[in-house]
Amino acid sequence: MTTICLIGYGKMGRMLHQLAPEKGLKVVGMVDPVWDGAAREISRDSLNNADVAIEFSHPSAVLSNLERLLDLNQNCVIGTTGWHQDLPRIVEMAKSSGIGMVYGANFSLGMNLFSRLIVDAVKLFDGFDDYDLMAWEKHHAQKADSPSGTAVELAKLILENSSRKTK
């Protein structure tokens, strides 16, 4: 059974904790600076020999969390959004440390299919000057990052696949 340590115990962290057993995962550690019952910081003890750390904290914490995970040679999955300005640095750090790292703006199947549809739609509409593409998002009041990392990634897809859009 794969063992995991949850870094961040917000909505996604709690959902992962709840779903872990039915997905064949065992939660052996939790790290969150404010959640009772979780360790306050990332350490060998708080990771508890987990096979992988799953990082769903806050964009402002991702870089320092990943630096700590890399220092501890901890394989990790990053699901937090809104930190990709640091991506080149993080990827280089992960490569040089030799750890396994997976990241994504959104791991849901629906969102990944939607991303593919966005690319196809941009290419279809690109030849029609009468049409202009835009992105608009709406979230619940507790959304930690705005615009969301997912929205930023979708906007990038539009810009990368349109010959007319520049912003």
Image (cartoon, rainbow, N blue to C red):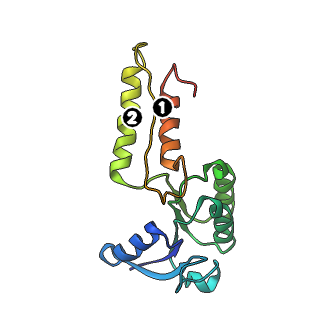
Identify the disc placed on residue 158.
Answer: 1
Question: Counting other residues with Cα less than 10 Å from the Cα at mark 1, is it few (<14), some (14-19), or many (20 or more)?
Answer: many
Residue at (61% x, 53% y) in the render: 83
Q: Residues within 10 Å of mark 2 (few under 14, many from 20)?
A: some
Q: Position of residue 108 (x, y in %)?
A: 37, 55
Gap in angstroms between the C-alphas marked 1 and 2: 7 Å
Where is 75 relative to 134, above or below?
below
Dot 1: what SS? helix
Instruction: Check the image and report above or below for 3 versus 88.
Output: below
Residue placed under numbered mark 2 in the picture: 118
> Where residue 119 sits in the image (x, y, percent)?
41, 32
The foreground one among 37 and 26 is: 37
Q: Which mark is residue 43?
A: none
Single out the residue that lies furthest toward the left: 22
Q: Position of residue 88 (x, y in %)?
A: 66, 49
Element at badge 2?
helix
Identify the residue at image location x=58%, y=52%: 82
Tags 1 and 2 touching, CB below 8 Å: yes
Q: Say which quarter of the image contains residue 72.
A: bottom right
- Tally of numbered tags: 2
Q: Quadrant of the C terminus?
A: top right
Amino acid at dot 2: Ile
